[in-house]
């Protein structure tokens, strides 16, 4: 390994960076956050510093206190992107994804085992590409209407003489 590569972060450091990012995004102090979570300030400080074991109850309390997404906090640690939770705080993407996954699990049950990896990869990649397209390429319906209207106009004679 080269000397200029960043040192791998542990889960505690990732969780700490995630929590700090969200708390600062909401412009809350440690004291305000601890009070909203109904835990002692020292306990909160250790939790935010990543010095404790992963505590799902605290993560859910923190999410409620900061009006953020508990599932996105967990996903941020899992994917190594502390800013992911902040990015999902308003739209609740982690919660939406988790609810969809729970409904899929309930619908298929053991049938999930029959799905092959290629099918799953294709479906998930398609989902994320379609979501990205809504931001990068605008509204697909609007683009379709605009393109269709342009096609029709090009086939019509020009007005006037």
Image (cartoon, rainbow, N blue to C red):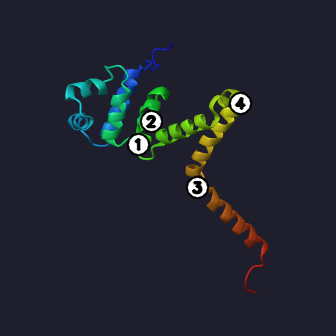
Element under label 4?
helix
Which numbered disc flags the more N-terminal residue, 3 or 2?
2
Q: Which residue is mark 3?
A: 138
Determine crowd level at label 2: few under 14, some 14-19, many 20+ residues with C-alpha closer than 10 A.
many
Give the mark toward the camera: 3 or 2: 2
Q: Quadrant of the C terminus?
A: bottom right
Answer left or right for 108 relative to 12.
Answer: right
Q: Residue 118: x and y, percent? A: 71, 30
* Whole-percent x, y for residue 139 in the image: 59, 57
* Residue corresponding to mark 2: 72
The CA span between labels 3 and 2 is 25 Å
Give the foreground label among 4 and 3. Answer: 4
The image quadrant that residue 46 belongs to is top left
Residue contact between numbered discs 2 and 4, judged by CB atoms under 8 Å: no
Q: CA distance from mark 1 to mark 4?
A: 31 Å
Whether tag 1 and tag 4 are in contact, CB under 8 A, the answer is: no
Instruction: Identify the residue under disc 1.
Output: 89
Q: Secondary structure at mark 3?
A: loop
- Is the residue 119 above or below the residue 11 in the image? below
**Disc 3 crowd, CA 10 A, few/some/many (<14, 14-19, 20+):** few
Residue 9 falls in image quadrant: top left
Instruction: State the residue at coordinates (38%, 41%).
Output: 68
Q: Position of residue 43 (x, y in %)?
A: 24, 25
For the image, the number of numbered tags is 4
Image-based side of 145 in relation to 138, left or right: right
Question: Which residue is label 4 attached to?
Answer: 118
Q: Is residue 5 above or below residue 61?
A: above
Graded by Cα atoms within 10 Å as few (under 14), some (14 to 19) or many (20 or more), the crowding at tag 1 reads many
Disc 1 to disc 3, C-alpha distance = 22 Å
**Residue occupying the point 54% across, 36% down:** 102
């Amino acid at each position: 390994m080269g000397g200029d590569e960043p040192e791998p972060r542990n889960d505690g450091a990732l969780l700490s960076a995630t929590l700090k990012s969200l708390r600062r995004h909401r412009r809350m102090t440690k004291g305000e956050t601890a009070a909203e979570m109904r835990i002692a300030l020292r306990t909160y400080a250790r939790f935010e510093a990543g010095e404790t074991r992963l505590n799902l109850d605290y993560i859910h309390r923190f999410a409620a206190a900061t009006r953020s997404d508990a599932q996105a906090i967990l996903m941020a640690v899992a994917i190594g992107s502390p800013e992911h939770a902040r990015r999902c705080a308003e739209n609740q993407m982690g919660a939406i994804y988790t609810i969809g996954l729970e409904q899929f699990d309930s619908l298929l049950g053991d049938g999930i085992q029959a799905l092959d990896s290629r099918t799953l990869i294709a479906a998930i990649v398609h989902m994320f590409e379609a979501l990205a397209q809504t931001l990068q390429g605008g509204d697909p319906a609007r683009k379709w209407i605009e393109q269709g209207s342009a096609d029709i106009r090009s086939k019509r004679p020009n007005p006037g003489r």
